Amino acid sequence: MANLMLTKRCNLHCSYCFANEFVNRQSDEMSYENFLTCLDFLSHDPQERIGLIGGEPTMHPELKRMLGKLIDSPFQQICLFTNGILLDRFFTELRNSKFTVLINLNAPSGIGQANFDRTIYNIDQMINHLYMRSQVQLSLNVYASDMDYGYMLDVLKRFQMKRLRLSVAVPNMEAGREVDPLAYFRMMAGTVRALVRDLLEIGVAPVFDCNYIPFCIFNDEDNALVSRYPEVMKRSNIHRINPVCSPVLDILPDLQVVRCFGMSSLYKVNLLDFRNTQELQRHFDAEIDKLAYHILPSDECRGCREYAAMRCSGGCYAYRLDKIRKLRQEIRSVWGELK
């Protein structure tokens, strides 16, 4: 999947946002010409999945035009990542079956009651009036060990949603990542465990995305959920995915590309220096991922067969960002001496 960062502006200021290097610090927006360049680059594979991200992509002044271009393109899988506040401006375009809308819904205490109510209104319009139920998904970032997620359960029940995208938020400042990731997962595990149980009880399948939880964090109680809620668990990926991170290509407004937002301060390349997304993914895999596996995320990972076999990443690479940066510098220094 390739994500196009349409704008660095956002109408919210989420404390955990991983795009904080960009969002609301700069007002850069992808020009329509650069947008077309991205589509041309991605056109080698019409099956490529495209994400429209920000900032908040619905704030881009030419989003309607961009959506129209995508409707006329050969691409069939396009996801708009949004907070949902301004969605009603784009209902006409988004009703096209090519689009899915992933709404990251924060609590009204965090985004304000008016913004929350506006998002709920837009969800209601899409599901109950525009026949877009299959195109709308909700997302929740678990960012605090004492997080109150009751509002999300209410929304899921109200709209009879069957899935919820989940991610354990990684501390978005480098100083905050100087923790043992397994210790961090365990700190968050109580909230995640309670949330997953509550979701299963109302028939909602948790689907984890990004910063996958290593299998060693799960206990016997977690494993018992598989047999306790077999039908719902069939729609979940908790016990069906290897917790392995791989490059997610984020294309910035100026056509610079980062492996993902978590690694954006480490390394950027120019889109036009590559021929296709496969080349980009292989490049980032060699420059970042392979190096990351030489840096243990935790002492507990020493001797772990899953980690040694590269079937587990040990959490987000952002926890190792500074160590990966130093290793890259050392390798480049040695390589320069050899040359």
Image (cartoon, rainbow, N blue to C red):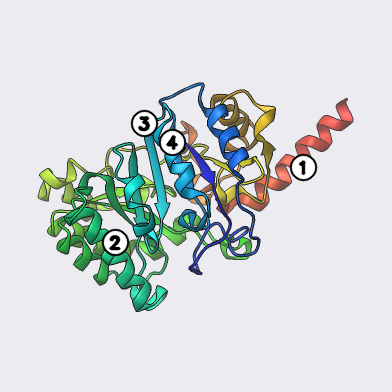
Label number found at residue 329 = 1
Indicate the amino acid at tag 2: Asn
**Earlier sequence position, callout 4 versus callout 1:** 4
- Distance from disc 3 to disc 1, alpha carbons, whole Å, reads 41 Å
- Binning the other alpha carbons within 10 Å of mark 3 as few (below 14), some (14 to 19) or many (20 upward) gives some
Between circles 3 and 1, the one closer to the viewer is 3
- Distance from disc 3 to disc 2, alpha carbons, whole Å, reads 23 Å
Q: Which sits in the foreground, 137 or 245?
A: 137
- Binning the other alpha carbons within 10 Å of mark 1 as few (below 14), some (14 to 19) or many (20 upward) gives few
Q: Where does residue 268 sit, x and y in percent of width and height?
A: 68, 42
Residue with the mark numbered 3? 76
- Distance from disc 4 to disc 3, alpha carbons, whole Å, reads 9 Å
Between circles 4 and 3, the one closer to the viewer is 4
Label number found at residue 70 = 4
Q: Secondary structure at mark 4?
A: helix
Between circles 1 and 2, the one closer to the viewer is 2
Disc 4 and disc 1 in contact, CB within 8 angstroms: no
Residue at left 48%, top 42%?
Answer: 66
- Distance from disc 2 to disc 4, alpha carbons, whole Å, reads 22 Å
Label number found at residue 122 = 2
Q: For residue 285, which quarter of the picture?
A: top right
Say whether residue 265 is left or right of residue 77. Answer: right
